[in-house]
Amino acid sequence: MACRFTQRQLAKRCAALARPMTNIAVSRTEPGRRRCDVDDLFAIAAALGVSASALLPQWAAHGAVSHSAAQTFNRIRETLRG
């Protein structure tokens, strides 16, 4: 799953999807310094052209109640960097 968008490009794509996000917000979300709520997760996934579950750890995507936010951020980072 490699999209190779810059943080600025991802922020623009999120804004075009009616979820305004600055490149600073993206840069803080990526390492987990900013909270990524469900709306952000779905906007980022749509902007990247992937399902939201693709950004979650495999076990969390299959109904597990608890998951590590750090793992979610790592998946977002991996997707951005390719």
Image: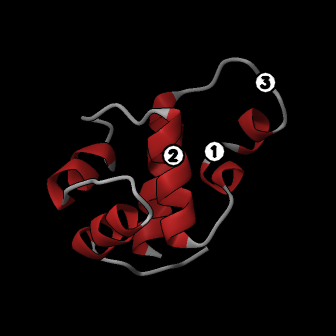
Q: Nearer the viewer, mark 3 or mark 2?
A: 2
| Residue type at tag 1 | Leu
Is residue 1 found left or right of 18 in the rendered image? right
| Residue type at tag 2 | Leu
Within 10 Å of the Cα at label 2, are there few (<14), some (14-19), or many (20+) other Cα atoms?
some
Is residue 49 found left or right of 60 in the rendered image? left
List x then y, in percent, for residue 47: 49, 68
List x then y, in percent, for residue 62: 84, 37
- The residue that label 2 is drawn on is 41
Please tell me which residue lies in front, 54 or 41: 41
Look at the numbered disc 2 and give the secondary structure of its residue. helix
Label 2 close to label 1 by CB (< 8 Å): yes
Is residue 14 found left or right of 11 in the rendered image? right
Q: Earlier in the sequence, mark 1 or mark 3?
A: 1
- Residue at 29% across, 64% down: 11
CA separation, marks 2 and 1? 9 Å
Label 3 close to label 2 by CB (< 8 Å): no
- Residue at 33% across, 62% down: 15
What is the total number of numbered labels drawn onto the structure image?
A: 3
Look at the numbered disc 3 and give the secondary structure of its residue. loop
- Residue at 48% across, 76% down: 82
CA separation, marks 1 and 3? 11 Å
Q: Nearer the viewer, mark 2 or mark 1?
A: 2
CA separation, marks 3 and 2? 17 Å
- Label of residue 64 in the image: 3
- The residue that label 1 is drawn on is 56
- Residue at 44% across, 63% down: 17
| Residue type at tag 3 | Ala
